């Protein structure tokens, strides 16, 4: 599922390709992904334009020139794609400009498209915590100090902090030397501060490398996310286990439960 780094890459892509262009036609509408009526969608988009982009956690916001927000969530396999002639395969929604257009591509139809009055109202409605990259160190530490459960599930709790999912929670904990099953309440203040530093570094590194794992530094878990390979940090062996119902990869040698 696209997580914060992926969606930030998508945001920058849309900002480069699709702003300040009049939307002349809305096509390829797949009602399965709409969280609003098709008539409402068309009313807000036709003859308007996208003025700005924003992101909160895993959600991409395209500000419409009528003041509303088009909100995109990408499910497991979605992404935006600019096209010059025909919309690409698996397009579930397309915005046609004078020349070319922007497609919402979602092969498995697990994403969602919303119309929102504002970013703030949407975040409140969805019960999202603050965007994790917007948090200051003391805010991050305070959130985790008041969170119970395992480190992995704490990082993935979108109501506490928005943006981290299964893939990047594993990477952050791997780089920080924290076992995914470690109880977050057992971590010291220094440990939580280090986790904050690692979180920012991992997410910014992923964004800088366009969220493409094969471009990540070789010391990163997601450079080769596979069970049984040698740990790039301590030469231990990468294990796979379900944690909080999600498949997790970690090194039991340097990622400590205590």
Image (cartoon, grey):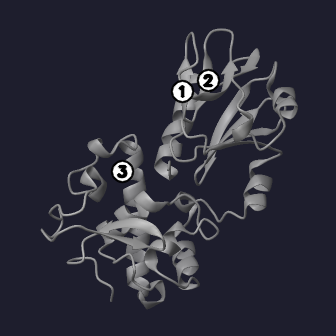
Question: How far across and down, in percent of the image, does residue 27 sit?
Answer: 72, 20
The residue where tag 2 is placed is 102
> Disc 1 on helix, strand or loop?
strand
Earlier residue among tags 2 and 3: 2
The residue where tag 3 is placed is 205
Q: Is residue 20 visible?
A: no
Residue shown at the point (55%, 22%) measured from the top left: 82
Earlier residue among tags 1 and 2: 1
> Disc 3 on helix, strand or loop?
helix
CA–CA distance in space, label 3 to label 1: 23 Å
The relative height of residue 9 versus residue 252 in the rendered view (above or below) is: above
Q: Would residue 124 be found to the left or right of residue 80 on screen?
A: right
> Disc 2 on helix, strand or loop?
strand
Residue shown at the point (63%, 63%) measured from the top left: 130
Q: Residues within 10 Å of mark 2 (few under 14, many from 20)?
A: many
The residue where tag 1 is placed is 81
The quarter of the displayed image where residue 248 is located: bottom left
Q: In what quadrant of the picture does the C terminus appear?
A: bottom left
Q: Would residue 106 be found to the left or right of residue 63 on screen?
A: left
Question: How far across and down, in percent of the image, does residue 60 sit?
Answer: 63, 43
Residue shown at the point (67%, 34%) measured from the top left: 52
Q: Is residue 239 visible?
A: yes
Q: Residues within 10 Å of mark 1 (few under 14, many from 20)?
A: some
The relative height of residue 7 versus residue 171 in the rendered view (above or below) is: above
Question: How far across and down, in percent of the image, does residue 171 sit?
Answer: 35, 62
The relative height of residue 227 versus residue 11 in the rendered view (above or below) is: below
Q: Would residue 72 be found to the left or right of residue 2 on screen?
A: right
Q: Would residue 170 be found to the left or right of residue 99 on screen?
A: left
Residue in the foreground of this view, choosing between 104 and 11: 104
Question: How far across and down, in percent of the image, does residue 78 sit?
Answer: 54, 39
Tell me if label 1 and label 2 are in contact, CB under 8 Å.
yes
CA–CA distance in space, label 2 to label 3: 27 Å
């Amino acid at each position: 599922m696209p997580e914060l780094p992926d969606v930030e890459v998508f945001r920058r892509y849309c900002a480069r390709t699709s702003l300040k262009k009049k939307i002349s036609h809305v096509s390829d509408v797949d009602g399965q992904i709409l969280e609003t009526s098709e008539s409402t969608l068309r009313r807000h988009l036709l003859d308007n334009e996208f003025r700005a982009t924003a992101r909160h956690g895993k959600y991409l916001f395209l500000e419409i020139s009528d003041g509303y927000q088009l909100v995109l969530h990408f499910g497991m396999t979605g992404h935006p794609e600019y096209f010059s002639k025909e919309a690409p395969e698996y397009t579930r929604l397309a915005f046609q400009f004078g020349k070319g257009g922007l497609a919402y591509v979602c092969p498995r139809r697990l994403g969602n498209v919303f119309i929102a009055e504002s970013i703030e109202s949407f975040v409140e409605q969805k019960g999202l915590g603050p965007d994790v990259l917007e948090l200051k160190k003391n805010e991050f530490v305070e959130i985790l100090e008041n969170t119970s459960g395992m480190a992995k599930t704490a990082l993935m709790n979108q109501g506490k902090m928005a943006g981290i999912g299964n893939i990047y929670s594993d990477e952050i904990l791997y780089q920080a030397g924290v076992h995914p099953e470690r109880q977050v309440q057992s971590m010291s203040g220094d440990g939580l501060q280090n986790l904050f530093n690692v979180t920012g570094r991992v997410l910014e590194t992923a964004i800088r490398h366009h969220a493409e794992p094969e471009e990540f530094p070789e010391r990163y878990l997601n450079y080769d996310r596979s069970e049984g390979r040698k740990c790039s940090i301590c030469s231990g062996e990468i294990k796979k286990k379900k944690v909080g119902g999600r498949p997790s990869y970690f090194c039991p040698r340097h990622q400590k439960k205590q």
